[in-house]
Amino acid sequence: MGLLGAGLVAGQSGAGAGKSERSIVAVVNHGQATDDDGAGRPEVVGSMVDRTMLAFTGKETVEEAWAGLVSADDVVGIKVNVRGGPRMSTQPCVVASIVAGLQAVGVKEQNILIWDAWNRELPPAGYAINESDQGIRCYGSDRGVHTTGTRLGRDELRKKVGEHYSDRPVKVADREVFFTRIIEEEITALINVPLIKDHRIAGLTCSMKNHYGSILNPSDLHGNACDPYLAALNATPPIRDKTRLILVDGLRGLYNGGPRDKPQWRFRPNCIVAGTDPVAIDSYALEVLERERKEKGMPPLGPRVRYLATAAEMGVGQINPEQIEFREVDLTPAT
């Protein structure tokens, strides 16, 4: 983990998640996981997800791995990120592998919910809306009410889609946010499935910033490069207490110009990453971006990604590489 010892994390004490606790981050690579457009090859991706689960949990079978995270009685929310459109969103082949794991341990179809903020953004990314009580459910927090991409203020949004968000604000640093009812009321277990992307304000968007799609008013949390807001948001009970797994779709990413898709800056990390420590996972995602940017002659993002150090200080997770156990597997066939 060469870059983890430089830039942003230099001199950090690793206060997050308890000084004596080590976080586990599993990374599985496969050089042929995607086609030339970055679309995942389903059979390869399925094997990558399975292997990542085994590496992360240390279990002997995939079923045992999932059984250690969820039970048959759970209602599981799979939080995808579809803000990037058809070619820069969480890929359905990754989610399909997660669903297969959940079903293997007895989670009923109707107790699996694939979701993000807005209904309108799910179909372009390959997800069919299903708001019925039959089969795997899939819908946005807004349930289709917010039909345009127009940016609205918090009060305007509350008038439009407020019934689908909690009416009890949660304090995040010096701001108040309203969580989607999906997290607060509908699900018992949460699986976070982000991507690895540059972000023009925070510097990085991966597991922690994916939860800006879990609240009504993310625009209130963008000041000061999202610091300390990203750290404080991920420390709140709705996220902290329900998260069972973070599984990063690292098949393709964006090393500049994010978070919206910018075709000229796409790249293909061809990896799947798993863990439960959002700080450790975002630290790894930052390393992936830094390597690509260095190769392209771009300046590092580290000085902008201030929220990671804050999150570690708040105990959200580990940033010190000595307190993170990386379990890496390369499934790329020998040539």
Image (cartoon, rainbow, N blue to C red):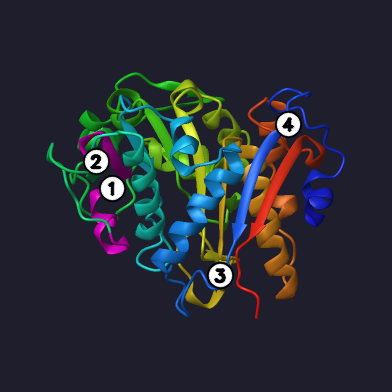
Q: Nearer the viewer, residue 53 or 307?
A: 53
Marker disc for residue 142 = 2
Give the amino acid type for the residue marked by disc 1 in the picture.
Trp
**Residue positioned most to the top:** 168
Position in image of residue 215 (x %, y %): 39, 35
The residue segment tinted magenta is 109-126
Lower sequence index among marks 4 and 2 = 4
Indicate the amino acid at tag 3. Arg
Mark 4 crowdedness (10 Å alpha carbons): few <14, some 14-19, many ≥20: some
Residue that extends furthest to the front in the rendered view of this protein: 60
Is 77 positioned to the left or the right of 289 in the image? Answer: left
Q: State the SS at label 2.
A: loop
Q: Is residue 243 left or right of residue 328?
A: left
Q: From this view, report whether residue 113 is shown above or below residue 52.
A: above
Q: CA distance from mark 2 to mark 1?
A: 6 Å
Residue drawn 74% across the image and 66% down it: 299
Residue 222 against residue 243 in the figure, above or below: below
Q: How far apart are labels 4 and 2 at the CA level?
A: 38 Å
Image quadrant in which you'd find residue 94: bottom left
Looking at the picture, how far across and down is residue 156, in whole percent?
A: 27, 38
Q: Residues within 10 Å of mark 1 (few under 14, many from 20)?
A: many
Q: Pick whichever of labels 3 and 2 is earlier in the sequence.
A: 2
Q: Residue 110: say if magenta.
A: yes
The residue indicated by pointer 1 is 118
Label 2–label 1 contact, CB within 8 A: yes
For residue 268, the mark is 3
Left or right position of 158 against 45: left
| Image-quadrant location for residue 127 | bottom left
Name the residue beneath numbered marker 4: 22
Looking at the picture, tell me which residue is in the foreground, 8 or 253: 253
Looking at the image, which residue is at 48% across and 75% down? 263
